Amino acid sequence: MKAFLVSVGMFTRLKVKDSSWENVQASSAICCLPLVGLMCGFVTYTVLIFGRMLAIKTNQLAFLATVSMFALSGFLHLDGFMDSADALLSSRDQEGKLRILKDSNVGAFSVIALSALALCLITSMQSWIESSFDDRMAILVPAASRAICAGGVFKFDSIAGSSMMAFFKNSQKPVHFIICVVEFVVIGGVFAFLSINGAIALAIATIFAIAVFCGANKALGGINGDILGMQIVVFEAAMYFLLTIAL
């Protein structure tokens, strides 16, 4: 329970009374990320349900649902997506990419990537709302993205100087990665139960997420918190896009 509260306190904007890292294995808190994802997904699900009940116009509800994906996390992962886009899309060498990744200024590549992301998510949400799709899927998408994120923490090397990644991996045990795999399999099973198209979309989006990790590992020599944020955002955008294609 302590590990879950710590995870909620760190990865959401919720104020948790007992969220200090003292006497808590950081790796255990990372394993709780999918539960945090369920909370984020429930926010989007609630927006969709009430939006339909109130007969909000499709384009407006699509906008609200898109914003709700990042609201509970305080846009934390979207920030990582933009920083990573600037670094990974540049033509610099590894040293130059790492320097860009650490730069807090907004570059052209991050603006382009954010614009493309917004178009992808909003148009996908419009298609979702116009369909009779099961809104419960919206709860599972961020849970799946964070299960992959947690697994990536344990399987990929961290960028030199990434204190956060080093902290998360410090108490790592084989069982932590196994927990992440089990969580992902359970989520995949629920997707398959709700819709076979959901399970197919999950499999394809997972390839995109792993590609982010592999690309960053090759270009930067490892991953850090920004790359984790990018993986979460890319996976969720791919999921909504693929799910609505299959409608």
Image: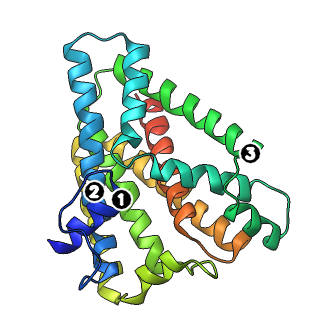
At 64% from the left and 54% from the top, the residue drawn is 83
- The reply to whether dot 2 and dot 3 touch (C-beta < 8 Å) is no
Q: Quadrant of residue 27?
A: bottom left
**Circle 1 residue:** 11
Neighbour tally class for label 3: few under 14, some 14-19, many 20 plus, Cα within 10 Å: some
Instruction: Out of 196 and 125, give the one closest to the viewer.
Output: 125
Residue 2: image x %, image y %?
17, 73
Could you tell me if residue 137 is visible in this image? no
Residue 109, numbered circle: 3
Q: Secondary structure at mark 1?
A: helix
Earlier sequence position, callout 2 versus callout 1: 1
Say which amino acid is labelled 2.
Answer: Val
Earlier sequence position, callout 2 versus callout 3: 2
At 29% from the left and 85% from the top, the residue drawn is 175
**Circle 2 residue:** 36
Direction from residue 132 to residue 157 in the image, left or right:
right
Say which amino acid is labelled 3.
Answer: Phe
Quarter of the image for the C terminus: give it.
Answer: top left
Could you tell me if residue 139 is visible in this image? yes
